[in-house]
Amino acid sequence: MTDDLIRRGLSRRGLLQTTAGLIGGTMLPAIPAFAEDQPIGSYPAGVSGSTAFIGISVPRTGTYAVQGEDELKGYQLAIEHINSGHELIKKISPKTSKGVLGKELKFGVADSAAKPNEAVQAQQRFISENKAIMITGGTSSAVAVALNKLAQREHVLFVCGISGSNDTTGKDCVRYGVRQNFFGQTAAAAIGPVMVREFGKNKKAAYLTPDYTYGHTVTKSMQDFLATAGWTTTTNQVAPLGAPDYSSYLLNVANSGADVLINVNWGHDAVLSTQQAKQFGVLDKMKLVVPYQVPFIARETGGLMQGVYAATDYWWTIEDKFPLAKMFNEAFEKKYGYKPEWGAENAYVSFAHWAHMCEQAGSFNPPDVIKAYEKGETIPSLVGDVHYRPEDHQCVRPVIIVKGKQQKDMKNKEDWYDVVEIVPGEGLMQKPDAFGCHLGDYT
Amino acid sequence: MLKQRPFLIETLTAIGLIVAPFVLPHLGFAPNTVNRILVWGLFGLGFDILFGFTGLLSFGQSAFYGTGGFVAAYLLTRTGFSNVLGALVIGMIAAAATGYLIGLIALRRTGIYFAMITVAIAEVFFFVEFNPLSDFTGGENGLPGVPTPSFNLGFTTIHFTNGWSLYQFIALCYFVGVIIALRIVRSPVGAIFSAIRDNPLRATAVGHNIHGYKLTAFVIAAAYAGFAGGLLGVLQAFMPPDAFTFDTSGQLVMQTAIGGRGTLFGPLVGATVWLFLQDFLQSALGLGAAWKLVLGVVFVLLVCFLRGGIVGGLVDLYSLMSGKRARKAAETEEAEVEAPQQAPPAPMRAKEVEHPAYSGPILKATGLTKRYGGLVANSDIDFSVNQGELRGIIGPNGAGKSTFFKMLTCEIAPTSGQIVFEGRDITGLKVTEVCQLGLTKSYQVNQLFTGLTVRQNLTIAALAELRGKFRLDLFRKLSDVKGLTEQVEHTLALVNLSRRADTPVSELAYGEKRRLEIGLALATSPRLLLLDEPLAGMSPRERVETVKLLKSIARGRTMIIIDHDMDSLFELVERVTVLQEGRVLVSGTPEEIKTNAAVQEAYLGGVHGEIAA
Amino acid sequence: MISWPNLVSQLFNGLALGALLALISSGLTIIYGTLGVLNLAHGAMFMIGGYAGFVAYQYTESFILAVIAGSLFVMLLGVVMERVIIRHFYHRPHEDQLLVTFGLGICFVELVRLIFSSQSQLVPPPALFQGITNLGFMFYPTYRLAVVGIVAVALGALFIILYRTRLGMIVRAGIEDSVMVDSLGINVYRVFMVVFGIGAMAAGFAGIVNAPVVSLTPGIGDDILVQTFVVVVIGGVGSFPGAILGGLIAGEIISVTSMFNPGYAYVMLFAAMTLVLVVRPHGLLGTKGRE
């Protein structure tokens, strides 16, 4: 009996190998004759036709759903502009005429629910079925880190969506991943001085931290920076993603004797914890700071952001200073009927940058595109000129410090914040190796 | 219908797995999706053994899926352990061990309690993964960088990388999983699993330690889950923390119910439907977030209208079409068989006596009392039965006869008093152990395994005697159990159900069910057989036959019979004990009882004369 | 680490949380006790109560009307659910009942998600209870304080229904012995329908009362469902006093553990459940009746 089984198993395995061999042979597309054009990842299979496919995974359900939908709008607008050769895209990527390298962009959208597993599943499908040439997604750094690793294994470029963790371009960085937006370190370095200026030295801070890489690293960066001004931490309340009630955490905060509450929570968690902080009298006892601004939080908390400092990637009222921002705001509002938040901005700009890099490389070949990023060329963005660091693939870009407006000062219903300061990126960045980044191989 | 040909299912599975890579791409399935379906299918094999076969609905399988997955992924990514298959097996063992510990707690309760506890367990594992153990599991980040398997065969190294290459490895795992699962469900243990699903009470009463078997099913399911969890990590190069979420358990349950429980392949079919619809609804129809609503509605409709799921539905359809022909054939056959009078079967031997030297009364109860709160059901009963005796018990309704039987078979514990069986004090033993000692009963209300055939029913009872109350012969074929076939056939002949052997219990006539009820008790070869109203509800003709049957089985064993049909009873038994209001009124020969004034009073309220039947 | 003001605050907060859990759990437990059906869609009922109240609030701007409308809507939903679907499952195995209610729960959640999106919705507390109350030892949101009172009243009402009415007698008899009720010559199915409605309403009422505390999302009922299971297992399935005791115990365990490390709150909760199962398998106030 046993012998029989083993024989079956073995003969089966042999059979399967033959099978796979046959399939492999027939499934691989005709390989171009150029010696340097070795197939890598979904290249060149993904761009052999007249289109190029992008896999997008954003949270459309769960705690980060609102921000995910906003991010998606940014992607869609960017793809529309790239395919039509919109003048805003041409400002960022001058070589773009229509599409990228003449290929029309197609895309697929999957709901990640801010869960790494869902995102990895969806992107694996986009890569294998649609031959995605580039993947994107985020809104959760856990997702971003997982997609980083997937991109590196599959050799498909990952243009990171919203991700605030230091690890994304730090200890979990990869050769095949790039990030445009600000993150824990730059947020802390930008908002920290403002806080010290505003609240003074040697203050006591309490933290609300979501329990994953984003929360941990942002809180750490804030603590490290504020410690230099003599600030101490009274309590750090670490809550799981999507916690339904923050009362226990907030009682600990309320009884901790802190002067400032630093709320690192994000998405719906940030909205809920802020509302409840108000209900428990915490906001009357201590000042609230949001180091990593959450799109729509001002609207969703119904005015609780009044007087609150926050660091962000983008706020639409900077359009007075930046003509590209004005163009973007107008295009976005025309299409979607409201002012863009930074999730949409990051989505739009990171795609525009990718288009720029592909045009510069003259090819979709991933190593070539990566090397274009790594040249560190100064390129435009909606908030002025920026560049990507070759050492960790992080975009060096300004951080905007905003302060919630009092209701009476709001000029229209979306005029939630005053722009306090636009802090240039260079001074905010850590040393490239400070967070343990090793990019890995090109192939 | 599939049982006739050995290895038919195995062969079909193998063919299916080999053909899949050629066919599925044309149907729009990417290799990755297929691999994922196989992982769910493997996960579901174990779950189906637990849920479909044993009837235990657990919402906590994610705990084991995650445990196996994270142990394997941790070994492969953090410790430098590089043997992928080895890590998967270690993960599986870890999950099985966890399953054993959890099972000890969760299986303390049954039914809905069990389901609730498993839900809670799934949640606690999720929280443990995130907090105390986040250094090992990566918390919300999971464990990225799980390698793919490669095997050094000496002359060459096979490396399973991704897509269809990895498919070979996963398909092989699934195939082995199917073979093992099939062996298990066809083993004696598998038979007992379905007995537990159909009627746990009777499975216990015929002498199986069902707690042990339930725990076995639970551990098997955990082991499958653990291995599948490890494969998930290999497949994705990333072990996601979501493996531990309640949603994972929920998805498995839904997939299994959609595909069809109790079919082994149901989960695979369910996963195919799930992943296909998810993809199709989201991308092709652009339903976005609404895809889950559609799946939910499909699921509810299936549960309402197609209990067996897709596979079950197909099997029903098949048997509906082929069954009509078969039934016609069987009917003509039956008519022919009816004619010749078969020689009466030899009396059935009773279980070997453990202490042949013992010669006292086979059963002796002293001072037996049962109180329910203030209500006294039995009070201070002294009762003794000799070897080989045929004893009748009568008494008006509410005299406490059934309670008395339940105490004798140790289904319920007496409030006070002692029961001695063959010189051994059995007070406080479990019904299972007592049955194993050779004392069992047939029930007043039929307690059959209703989802099974007559033969399967008797097989389950016979297995208890032949294998003892607990044995883990998971890979033994039923036909390899020594003496099983003989015992089952013999019992079938005794209770005159040979021609109905392969009929499902649900299709039996009432008299036949009654005979099977006795057969179930008989198949355990008891030396002392208690029969609780064996003639209840029978037609006069059936009574005559059954009395004949009882006489034939009485040879070589002791029997105690409760019945209201006194004519039949008095004809059958040597002595009669009369119970009234929970006490022994009188004992004596049928003649003495018939003329006893006290008995007449009890039955007829003081009117003198012989008791009319 | 232990600060007394914080301990007192947390104990008080545990009471508030526990009261809410007690109300939801008693809905679950009387349905189960009477009908023998464990309603896995109970968490969804809690959620729908919140949304129904939210809609009513949008139209009427009155919190009281929102509470009434929300509760009645969920009761109606419960009755319809019982009539149309659950009724056909009384004679099917427990597993099927679990599966169908589980599936219905998912349908409800996803339907609400489709209609209202995943965005959180706000129901402001009634004007009367807005603001913060200084309890001396702590500041506590006035509305949460009011919730403790409202829930206590609701539990009292349930108590009266269960212990002072004919319906309650039947329900309690059913919990003790379902066979007996069948033989009482009562139209059991009508009782079942009413009980299902009341049980669902308890969850729906809790949902709308709780809505101003947490803000609404479609997934809000999922966590609550698991917690109510723990409550019911601790208190004893089918036992109304058990649900209340279990709710309070669960609330305190969560709160007190949270003082040290909120991440362990649920771990401790489940540890307590395991302990109860080992020491008293039928729950603290449970009877052997239903299994």
Image: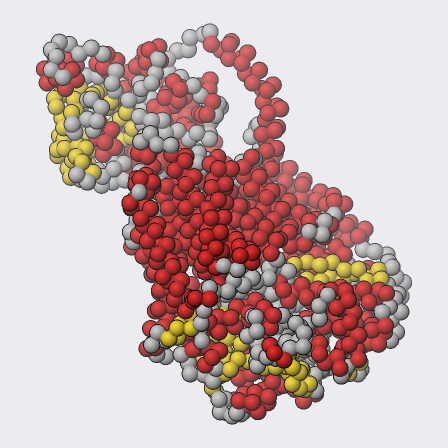
Quadrant of the rendering where the N terminus of chain A is positioned: top right
Q: Residue at x 48, y 35 (%)?
A: C88
Depicted B414 relative to depicted C274: above or below: above
User: In the picture provided, is C243 more to the left or to the right than A354?
Assistant: left
User: In the picture provided, is B349 more to the left or to the right than B75?
Assistant: left
Q: Residue at x 17, y 17 (%)?
A: B603
Question: In the image, residue B142 lies at what x, y percent?
Answer: 57, 66
Q: Looking at the image, which is closer to me, A117 or C219?
A: C219
User: In the picture provided, is A106 more to the left or to the right than C210?
Assistant: right
Depicted B250 relative to depicted A410: above or below: above
Q: Looking at the image, which is closer to me, B147 or C109?
A: C109
Note whether residue B331 is visible: yes
Quarter of the figure with residue B304: top right
Question: In the image, residue C23 lies at what x, y percent?
Answer: 38, 55
Q: Residue at x 57, y 80 (%)?
A: A308
Q: Residue at x 32, y 24 (%)?
A: B349
